[in-house]
Image: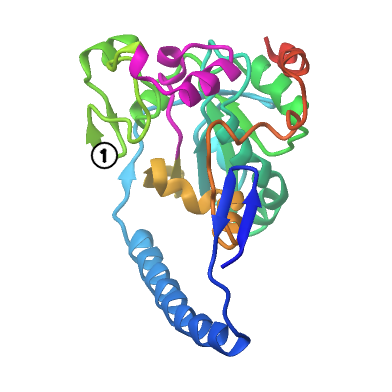
Amino acid sequence: MPKIKTVHGTVNHKVVSPEKWLDTRVALLKAEKKLTRLSDDVARKRQKLPWIKIDKDYQFDTDDGKTSLDDLFKGRSQLLIYHFMFGPNYIAGCPHCSAIADGFNGFWVHLANHDVMLSAVSRAPLQKLQAYKQRMGWTFPWASSYGSDFNYDFNVSFTPEQQRSGNMEYNYNKGNISSQQNDIAPTDAVSEEGKKIAASTGTDWATFTQEGPGMSAFVLQDGIVYHTYSSYARGLDGLWGIYQWLDRAPLGRNESGFWMHRHDEYGQTSQQKDESKDCCA
């Protein structure tokens, strides 16, 4: 059994003949096909969910000026919104949200030509979003909901009062923000990784977790906008292109510590990272 050295340590793994490998691979293929069929079935059930009429007049700041929710469709009948963690007090976007958004740049045009508009929405003022977007080299639409109830209504932003009282709803649970810790927990209970992630956005942990990741789907029919679906926490795993590749790599996700950085930060010194964030301050 060979020992494979990785950046995270040494891994022991079984080695077999090509014939034995083929037997185990075919067995796995059966499980993969079952999972694919199950995923297709879940997608059909997702599309059959009932709709909720949107009655509130949400306003957003965009590159095109002040717009409403139906304006974000840009002539399409469907709208997918990624709730990007970038609060008003951040100086840079969440590194994990940034990793997801790197993928948006390639496929949002394809969606737009399939009657589906993709847009990110964050609470930070538009000027901050535009500066960060330029830094990252992104072209997909990104709207600011600063001063709007939008993020709060879709349970991806929380007030300090909600954090202190525990009166929060995230991923369809009250008083829970999934695997993230909030300032209800004592400061020393927050992991070092969590502190580093928060610091990379220019905030502390309590301020950082006033935002949460998610995605929401909408449809526009006869001038009326309907909310059709929202997902949060690990429900977003399928949107992370990097995870889909890592799940097929020999060592899987192999996550250890604060390993996922913004694409322009790998190999940088701490000083260089600070300088790269100055553009959005």
Say whether residue 159 is visible: no
- Magenta run includes residue 206: yes
**Residue located at (52% from left, 46% from top):** 79
Q: Left or right of 112: which side holds 88? A: left
Q: Amino acid at mark 1?
A: Tyr
The residue tagged 1 is: 172
- Magenta run includes residue 228: no
Q: Left or right of 257: which side holds 106? A: right
Q: Residue 5, relative to residue 167: is it above or below?
A: below
**Residue located at (53% from left, 25% from top):** 122
Residue extending farthest to the bottom is: 19
**Residue located at (33% from left, 42% from top):** 53
Q: Tell me the magenta residue range.
A: 188-214
* Label 1 CA crowd tier, 10 Å (few <14, some 14–19, many 20+): some
Decide which of 29, 238 is in the foreground and name it. 29
Residue 23 in picture, x, y percent from top left: 50, 87
Q: Residue 241, relative to residue 19: is it above or below?
A: above
Residue 89 in picture, x, y percent from top left: 53, 10
Decide which of 68, 184 is in the foreground and name it. 184
